[in-house]
């Protein structure tokens, strides 16, 4: 019992470091960059509030667990913005190593189940993971619309890039959300200087 609890507390203490990982996205008011722990909480809230946009086969409790864990690897691997230039193979290797280390802190049963949820989210093949990925992709554009463009301006993002990188997963997991945000994106980019 003590050994199990020590392992769990060690993981939880390590997870605190997610609060120090800054993302490329800003808060809605534009006052500062968001950290990965804030993102994880906010995207979970998005999934919970927007659960009625999910396919009926989606189990929201599993989606929430995936979103809680989805960026934990950023403690070691850092945040790699979707619009940044990244060596995908190197990023994947860093994230796998981070998952090995971080989930490896947990007791065996939790190590296996948490890692499986993380892997499922990354693969985005099950109904739960497809919806989780769509919600993860929705949160930043909503924020960028609120803060005047945020990371889109920083990375010179175009509407075509958004449609490919963000639209595809949102449309796949929550088509109604894409139908809602697309006119807003078009409006923003129509007014935005290139």
Image: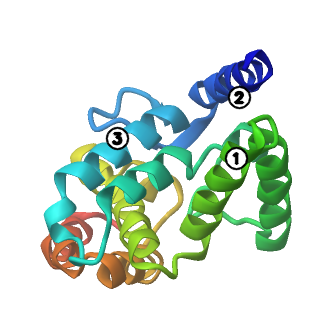
Q: Residue, x 21% and y 77% (percent of image)? A: 56
Alpha carbon distance from label 2 to label 3: 21 Å
In the displayed structure, would residue 161 be above or below residue 50? below
Left or right: residue 180 versus residue 68 is: left
Q: Which of pointers 2 and 3 lies earlier in the amino acid sequence?
A: 2
Indicate the position of residue 194 as horizontal and vertical percent values: 38, 69
Q: Residues within 10 Å of mark 2 (few under 14, many from 20)?
A: some
* Scheme of colours in the image: rainbow
Q: Residues within 10 Å of mark 1 (few under 14, many from 20)?
A: few
The residue tagged 1 is: 109
Q: Nearer the viewer, mark 3 or mark 1?
A: 1
Location of residue 16 (image quadrant):
top right
Q: Residue furthest front?
A: 1
At mark 2, the secondary structure is helix
Alpha carbon distance from label 3 to label 1: 27 Å
The residue tagged 3 is: 42
Residues at marks 3 and 1 touching, judged by CB atoms closer than 8 Å: no
Disc sitting over residue 11 in the figure: 2
In the displayed structure, would residue 6 be above or below residue 34? above
Q: Residue, x 75% and y 37% (percent of image)? A: 107
In the displayed structure, would residue 41 be above or below residue 166? above
Indicate the position of residue 8 as horizontal and vertical percent values: 68, 26
Alpha carbon distance from label 1 to label 2: 14 Å
Q: Nearer the viewer, residue 185 or 121?
A: 121
Indicate the position of residue 171 as horizontal and vertical percent values: 30, 82
Residues at marks 2 and 3 touching, judged by CB atoms closer than 8 Å: no
Left or right: residue 111 versus residue 147 is: right
**Quadrant (top left/top right/bottom left/bottom right) for the N terminus:** top right
In the displayed structure, would residue 64 be above or below residue 30? below
Location of residue 59 (image quadrant):
bottom left
Q: Nearer the viewer, residue 47 or 77?
A: 47
């Amino acid at each position: 019992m003590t050994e199990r609890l020590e392992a769990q507390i060690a993981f939880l203490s390590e997870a605190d470091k997610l609060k120090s990982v800054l993302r490329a996205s800003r808060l809605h008011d534009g006052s500062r960059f968001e950290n990965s722990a804030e993102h994880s909480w906010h995207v979970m809230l998005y999934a919970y509030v927007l659960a009625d946009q999910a396919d009926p086969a989606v189990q929201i409790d599993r989606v929430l667990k995936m979103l809680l864990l989805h960026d934990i690897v950023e403690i070691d691997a850092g945040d790699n913005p979707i619009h940044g230039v990244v060596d995908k193979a190197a990023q994947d290797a860093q994230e796998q190593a981070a998952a090995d280390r971080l989930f490896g802190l947990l007791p065996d049963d939790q190590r296996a189940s948490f890692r499986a949820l993380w892997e499922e989210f990354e693969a985005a093949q099950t109904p739960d993971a497809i919806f989780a990925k769509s919600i993860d992709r929705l949160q930043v554009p909503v924020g960028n619309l609120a803060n005047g463009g945020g990371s889109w301006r920083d990375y010179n993002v175009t509407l075509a890039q958004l449609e490919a990188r963000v639209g595809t997963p949102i449309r796949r997991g929550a088509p109604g959300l894409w139908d809602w945000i697309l006119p807003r994106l078009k409006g923003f980019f129509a007014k935005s200087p290139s």
